[in-house]
Structures are given as C-alpha cells and as structure tokens.
Image: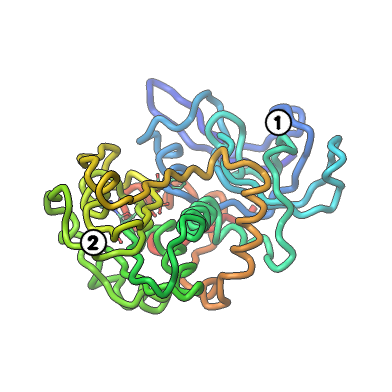
C-alpha cells in the first residue's frame, strides 16, 4: 500500500483527499517508480482546487512534476535503482501524477536525473525551470549575444521568470526584470542576477506599432499587452521567447516589429518537448544554476499540507518553490 493525494469530483466540486492505494490501482505504463519528491506548480494549484479545467478524468492523482527511483521496468532504458525525473506529457492532468508515493509511467516520458543534481534540487527546478531553460536556449540559438544589450524578463518573480533571470545572468547577459511586486521582490531579483527592476505597469501601457528599441531579446511569461509592448521595443534582429499567459492569452500587436525590424517571436512549450532537447536542457540546468539558487526560499511540505498550499498558489501568495516530500 502507498499514500496518494486523490482528486474526485462531486457536484462539479473538486475534492482532494489522502488515500491508501495499491499498485494494481495505478494506470498502465512500463516503469514503476518510488516517488521521492513532487513540486507544486500553478497548474497543480488549479487542478487541486478545481479553479481551472486541468484534470481530464477523475479520480486523478495530481502532480505535473516528479522525481524518484525506478523499482520495476520492462523498458531496457531503465533499470531498478535508476534515478529519474518527469515533467509534463499530461501527467497529473490525464495520467496519474507525482503526488503519490508510487507512479507508473511511460518510459518515453522520463529523463535520467542529471548526475550533478539530487531529487529535491530537480524539483526546485521542475517544469518552471525546464521552461526557463528552453526559453534561454531559444534566445541563444536565435543569435542573441550577451554583449549586445539588455535582455528583458517579464513575470520575473514567478517560477519561470526567476529561473530565466538566474540563467541569463549566469550566461553573462544584462537582465532587466519586470515585476508587479518591485518593493517586495526587487532585492531578491537582484540577488538572482537582475541588473535593474522595471515596474510592470510601465509595460502595460498600450503599445505603438514600433517604439524606441530597448531590448536585444526577451523572455515573456505574461502574454497579452505586455508581450505586445515588448515586441514593439525589441532591437532590430532581436528575439522574444514566449512561454506564458499570466496576463492573458491574447496578443494585441501588429506585424510591424516582424517586417520592419526582423524581430523573431519564438514559441516555447515544455510539456511535449522531445527527449534529446529535454535531456540537453536538464544537463545545462545542472551546469548553470549556482548553489545560491538552491539556497533560496524553498518550502518542503508533506502531502497533507498540499491542499492548503494549492489554494495559496492560486491566490499568488507563494514566494519561491514548494516541493512535496513523498
Ligand atoms: P507563476 O504564477 O509562478 O508566475 C507568474 C508571474 O507573472 C507572477 O509571479 C507575476 O510576476 C506575473 N503575473 C501574474 N499575474 C500577472 C498579470 N495579470 N499581468 C502581468 N504579470 C502577471 O507562474 P510560472 O512562472 O510557473 O508560469 C508563468 C507562465 O508560464 C504561466 O502562464 C504558465 O501557464 C506558463 N507556463 C508555460 C509553460 C510552457 O511549457 N509553455 C510551462 C510552465 C509555465 P511579478 O509578481 O513579478 O509581476
């Protein structure tokens, strides 16, 4: 028997309870994992509270991220004892996820835990960190050079934004961090490597088709009018990696930045990211993130505390990462 957080739906309300399950109840898959840690993402918060349509069928074990040790495998790539990490692939949405002491998964979804990381560190990174790495790599691949000027990061105090600030600073970029919580989080963002802080409201003014060129590149987690403003301010031949919709999923822009300034808009998805690219991103994360990143605010909770934390994350009341010890 093992312990799991299980979501059920009654009268359109999502209920989260701790249950004792056995292996026979787990979904199909070719690798059985003893889960060590999961992490709490905004998406998990929406799933657990029922505030967002994340879960595709009930009962569901939430948890879009997990790390653990293989205990059974019929796939030749994984042997009992191997340490693995999983993010994305619809796990915790359509297939039982990480908030249980055991998970049965498809080997294609896994990556080996990089040698330089322990399980808890990998969950401090999680989907948010992987997404940030994919954004930064996209800017590098698009030719954005550290010496060329400042790179902007929007939604900087969020999970994705804060790792993007850290990674860009480690790579020698000058980083301007956009936040709606400058008083609260400005010093922390500077400690991660931001060279200056920009108030969110400055980016929320309606954008003209083209504005003064300010940024050699950008990582945008916000979308909507903020992304439109960023596109209008990016330098000739610059690039913007867009991964999020914290401010809305619309994009009230024009073609002008693309056709007159050669600006590139790079779409980033971490959920279905193919193995080779995913593996390379985890390797790079393990090399680039400094020890100070792991020493930053991280709350470790047990399964019983998850529903309360899920409510808090949907209200924007969480700072730093929450990892769940199974
Ligand atoms: P968080 O909730 O941790 O952070 C989002 C940040 O955006 C907040 O901390 C806040 O930063 C800022 N923000 C919040 N609301 C608004 C608003 N209304 N207008 C402008 N800024 C706002 O989320 P994550 O960092 O985990 O994710 C960021 C986005 O990326 C989300 O939309 C998420 O869905 C998406 N995502 C996409 C992935 C992909 O594969 N494409 C994977 C993971 C996440 P501050 O207080 O500093 O302003």
User: CA–CA distance between discs 1 and 2?
Assistant: 42 Å
* Left or right: 311, with 120 as reference point: left
Please determine whether, in this image, residue 13 is positioned above or below residue 165. above
Mark 1: secondary structure: loop
Location of residue 195 (image quadrant): bottom left
Ligand 1 within 8 angstroms of badge 2 C-beta: yes
What residue is pinned by disc 1? Answer: 26
Location of residue 18 (image quadrant): top right
Give the residue furthest to the top: 11
| Residue plotted at (29% across, 45% down) | 258
| Residue plotted at (38% across, 51% down) | 313
Provide residue 269's location: percent of width, then percent of height. 49, 42
The residue nearer to you, when weighing 11 against 161, is: 161
Please determine whether, in this image, residue 112 is positioned above or below residue 93. below
* Left or right: 326, with 322 as reference point: right
| Residue plotted at (30% across, 58% down) | 236
Q: Which mark is residue 180?
A: 2
Please determine whether, in this image, residue 247 is positioned above or below residue 194. above
Q: Label 1: few (<14), some or many (≥20) within 10 Å?
A: some
Provide residue 81's location: percent of width, then percent of height. 84, 53
Q: Which one is in front in this view, the residue at disc 1 or the one at disc 2? A: 2
The residue nearer to you, when weighing 103 against 77, is: 77
Provide residue 301's location: percent of width, then percent of height. 53, 58
* Left or right: 71, with 158 as reference point: right
The residue nearer to you, when weighing 163 against 18, is: 163
Q: Which mark is residue 218?
A: none
Mark 2: secondary structure: loop
- Residue 116 visible? The answer is yes
> Which numbered disc, 1 or 2, marks the residue that appears first in the sequence?
1
| Residue plotted at (33% across, 70% down) | 150
Instruction: Give the position of the N terminus as an image quadrant.
Output: top right
């Amino acid at each position: 028997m093992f312990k799991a957080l299980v979501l059920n739906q009654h009268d359109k309300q999502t209920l989260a309870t701790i249950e004792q399950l056995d292996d026979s109840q787990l979904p199909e898959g070719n690798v059985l994992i003893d889960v060590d840690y999961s992490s709490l993402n905004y998406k998990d918060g929406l799933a657990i509270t029922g505030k967002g349509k994340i879960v595709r069928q009930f009962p569901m074990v939430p948890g879009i991220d997990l790390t653990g040790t293989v205990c059974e495998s019929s796939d030749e790539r994984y042997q009992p004892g191997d340490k693995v990490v999983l993010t994305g692939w619809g796990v915790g949405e359509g297939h039982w996820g990480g908030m249980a002491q055991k998970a049965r998964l498809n080997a294609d979804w896994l990556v080996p835990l990089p040698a330089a990381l322990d399980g808890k560190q990998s969950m401090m990174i999680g989907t948010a960190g992987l997404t940030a790495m994919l954004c930064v790599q996209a800017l590098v691949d698009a030719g954005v050079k550290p010496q060329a000027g400042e790179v902007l990061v929007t939604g900087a105090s969020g999970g994705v934004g804060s790792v993007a600030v850290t990674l860009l600073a480690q790579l020698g970029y000058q980083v301007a961090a956009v936040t709606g919580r400058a008083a609260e989080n400005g010093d922390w963002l500077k400690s991660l490597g931001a060279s200056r802080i920009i108030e969110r409201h400055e980016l929320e003014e309606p954008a003209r088709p083209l504005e003064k060129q300010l940024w050699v590149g950008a990582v945008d987690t916000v979308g909507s009018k903020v992304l439109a403003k960023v596109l209008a301010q990016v330098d000739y031949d610059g690039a913007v990696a867009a991964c999020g919709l914290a401010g809305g999923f619309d994009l009230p822009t024009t073609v002008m930045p693309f056709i007159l300034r050669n600006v590139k808009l790079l779409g980033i998805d971490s959920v279905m990211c193919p193995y080779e690219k995913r593996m390379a991103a985890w390797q790079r994360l393990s090399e680039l993130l400094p020890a100070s990143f792991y020493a930053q605010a991280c709350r470790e909770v047990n399964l019983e505390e998850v529903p309360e934390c899920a409510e808090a994350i949907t209200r924007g009341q969480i700072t730093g990462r929450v990892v769940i010890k199974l």
